[in-house]
Amino acid sequence: MTTIMKSLISSIAIVSVLMLNGCNDDKKEKKTAVIKQDDLKGQFVLKFSHVVSPNTPKGKAAIFFEQRLEELSNQRIDVQVYPSSQLYKDNAVLKALKLDSVQMAAPSFSKFGKIVPQLALFDLPFLFKDMAHLHRVQDGQVGTKLKEMVNTKGYIALNFWDNHFKQLSSSKKALIMPEDAIGQKFRIMSSKVLEAQFHSVGANPQMMPFSEVYSGLQQGVIDGQENTISNIFTKKFHEVQKYLTITNHGYLGYLVVMSEKFWNSLPADLQKNVTQAINEATLKEREYAEELNTKQFSEIKAYAKKTGNIEIINLTDEQKDAWRQAVSKIYPEFYGTDKIGEDLINGALATE
Ligand code: LMR
């Protein structure tokens, strides 16, 4: 809630109290009720920290959640959204959640690597046929099992949110066949799966926080990166890259998590409000993910046409197949239950 809104609410509260002061005794009870209601406004402060721009699926859904939860809770919960790594970078937010320094976050799956490595299931390249298949996995048994694992680590797993499929970009060499990646330095999130994925094509993966990718590309510390169209566009990576290949090779999504301490401090009615707001925000989030990735791809294409600074490469089926074969061979490396687990991988593959 903004400061202006807050002062407006407290002025309304003061006016109500003044008006009621002029009323006679039989209205006394009502007067107490009004004062109590106002006293409860902002009773709980929920800070929601994330690393992407406001104009992304996660950024927009966070704002939707803020408005909806404040409305449902009659402003008893004051939601404050901090985008663009303003509060915490990447997985640092998970430590902050544990300490209840921040109450909510939606880190991408890779960032849970040290807590629940099994969530890296979603990082496995070419595992999902399409977004519908992915949603069936998240909404089914595999998704439930993964959320339970997160809950046992002292977090409250709320829901899965989408970004979309990732694409590859580079300034060194156009990526058409897997061999084109040999020797190129790619930024990755902190993830064993992504490390293995780039090693499988002879590339050199470098872990780097999201907030440092633009300068890393601009200064040539890294040659390329992988991310969704929405993240590429909103962080302007396309302005510092020469080639963008539409590979849709892997998925980027999030698990929305809440501080356990905060959740336990909420009375049952407010917990219900949180659940309702997150369920509504999740439906919206999936729409934003489709809309924004499509719209922002048109913007990148328009930029490419106007400036000629970046070439967009669409792969043929054969070329895409060559990437699939090269990178999917890493699956068995993650069959161990302390990694991802064969059951979870097969469970996702077998999800109809
Ligand atoms: C990244 O680090 O590339 C992503 O996890 C950023 C995000 O949250 O979408």
Image: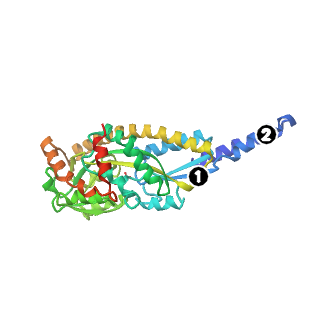
Q: CA distance from mark 1 to mark 2?
A: 31 Å
Disc 1 marks a residue whose amino acid type is Asn
Number of marks present in the image shown: 2
| Front residue of 230 and 256 | 256
* Local crowd size for mark 1, using a 10 Å CA cut-off: few (<14), some (14–19), many (≥20): few
Percent across and percent down for residue 298 are 28, 39
Q: Which mark is residue 31?
A: 2
Q: Are marks 1 and 2 in contact (CB under 8 Å)?
A: no
Task: Identify whether 173 is placed above or below 294.
Answer: below
Q: Amino acid at mark 2?
A: Lys
- Relative placement, left or right, of 244 versus 13 is left
Vertical placement of 117 versus 9: above or below?
below
Q: Is mark 1 within 8 Å of ligand 1?
A: no
**Dot 2 lies on which element?**
helix
Residue at (38%, 52%) from the top-left corner?
Answer: 108
Which circle marks residue 264 in the picture? 1
Quarter of the figure with residue 335: bottom left
Residue 46: % across, % down = 56, 51
* Left or right relative to 155: residue 344: left
Depth order, front residue of 316/239: 316
Of circles 1 and 2, which is in front? 1
Q: Is mark 2 within 8 Å of ligand 1?
A: no
Q: Position of residue 352 (x, y in %)?
A: 30, 36
**Residue 172 in view, yes or no:** yes
Classify mark 1: helix, strand or loop: helix
